[in-house]
Amino acid sequence: MVSKQVELSQAPRGLAILGLIGPGVVWAGLAIGGGELVLIPRVGSVYGMMFLWMPILAIALKYFMVNEIGRWSIATGTTIIDGLALIPGPTKWLTWILLFVALYLGAVHIGGLVAMVGIIFHNLVQVFTPFAWSIIIMVSFVVLSWTNRYSIMEKVLMVMVGVLTISVVIIGIAYFPPLRELAEGFLLRIPSVTPEWAVKNYKISTTPMVEILPAMAFAGCGAVNSLWYSDWVLSKGIGLGKYFDGLENTALKYEELKTLDQSVVAKIKGWIRVMFHDALWGANVLTIVVSFFYLLLAIVVLNPMQQAPGGMKFIMTLSQTFTKTLGPWAKWLYLLGAFGVIYSTMATIYDGYARTINKLILVCLPGWEGYKKISHLWRYRIWFLYGTCANFFLVYIFNAVPVNFLQAAAWVEGTFLLPVVAFAVAWLTAKKLPSFYSDSTRGMIKPHWVFTAGTIVAGIFYIILIGVLISQ
């Protein structure tokens, strides 16, 4: 008998599963962010239809990794960061790397979006200056997350993701190209030459992969961002996440999992099935659809015009073009969707880094008693305010450039770290996780080989892209 009686309800089946979709939509709100709105479409405006398949494939492959991250948390009741501390090698080597990366990214990741969100909302409602709107919106993030209540954030993100999805699909259908032209975007070709106009007018690198790789890193989510799906699954209370106490840990220990009887493990397996649909439909398919239309608009509208402005100029150029061809309604609809994209991304990033930095410190420095004496809610608030203030000051005090911020974050978090995290997650769920369960139940928890293989392929895909960069 385990030290704490485990009582789980039966997981829903069929259409009833849709009522529990939530963490995936929150993940989509993060994934459909600065990369999908600015970096990826800008690269598409430079290289045209040839580039279309690359981010779509990257997002699809990341589904396997996200699914396995969710599996770990549902089957252990712990965060994926707890699992990454168990990776073979020097003690906690990967979590130490993630801690330094998270501290850096928490300060710079969305610096560019701070300025963008103020400018966009100023164009929608010209009551205050862009600076004032940035202040107001950032205060709303603090209010949204101050209590660390996942349910509130999930509801807000549901609305924002709905707004951005509807807006981009409506405009995207209006510009949808002939199927023959669209098919050219799925011939698996990799751009080898940068157009002369892009190099001359927009200082785009003559080496295509220098521009493509940072954009690809944000296709879906980067390495650190993808880990947050674990936190949101636990906060939702799915599976053994029912026993997770917020920012800390589960009431269960790994060694106690061996004593769970088959009826309990069968229920855990049922909740993994629920998570499968949440990650597939709520996170992956939704992200692919929205990213596809944002990228397609840049390709069919800006590429023929030979325009690839950066940052806010990119968004405003597209919105002005829509006004000329479709009418003023298209501009407002696009800007409303862009606001939904940036707001949802900023909200999830502030929350995600606060949770991640706090957890990484607890894992890497378990003997830091002074830190532990601070309540877990205030630790969350400290790191939430760290990200909020750092990003704000970098943009408005040091006049940092939005695109440079996004690219810097992408190189660090997505391009080089993602293969490492993908391989680590695959090992955790295929090898380590089953070992926690008894001989009679581990087969119910172990992932199908397709999920392990898909996670590994996701890492290999980025290694191949890095290889192409080196060869160019």
Image (cartoon, rainbow, N blue to C red):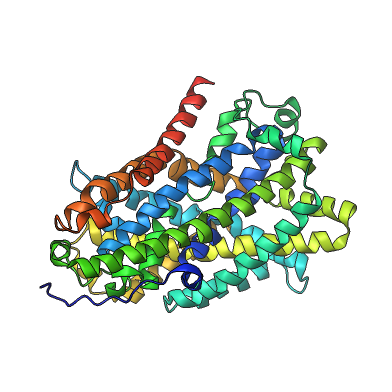
Residue 166 point in image, percent of width and height: 69, 63
Q: Residue at x 29, y 72 (%)?
A: 244
Residue 146 point in image, percent of width and height: 45, 77
Of the 4 image quadrants, the one containing the C terminus is: top right
Residue 94 point in image, percent of width and height: 28, 46
Q: Residue at x 21, y 72 (%)?
A: 251
Q: Residue furthest left?
A: 1
Hey, which quadrant is residue 33 in on the image? bottom right
Q: Residue at x 47, y 44 (%)?
A: 61
Q: Residue furthest top?
A: 471
Which sits in the foreground, 286 or 317? 286
21 to the left or right of 116? left
Does residue 92 appear in this view? Answer: yes
335 to the left or right of 386? right
Residue 177 point in image, percent of width and height: 78, 42
Does residue 215 appear in this view? Answer: no
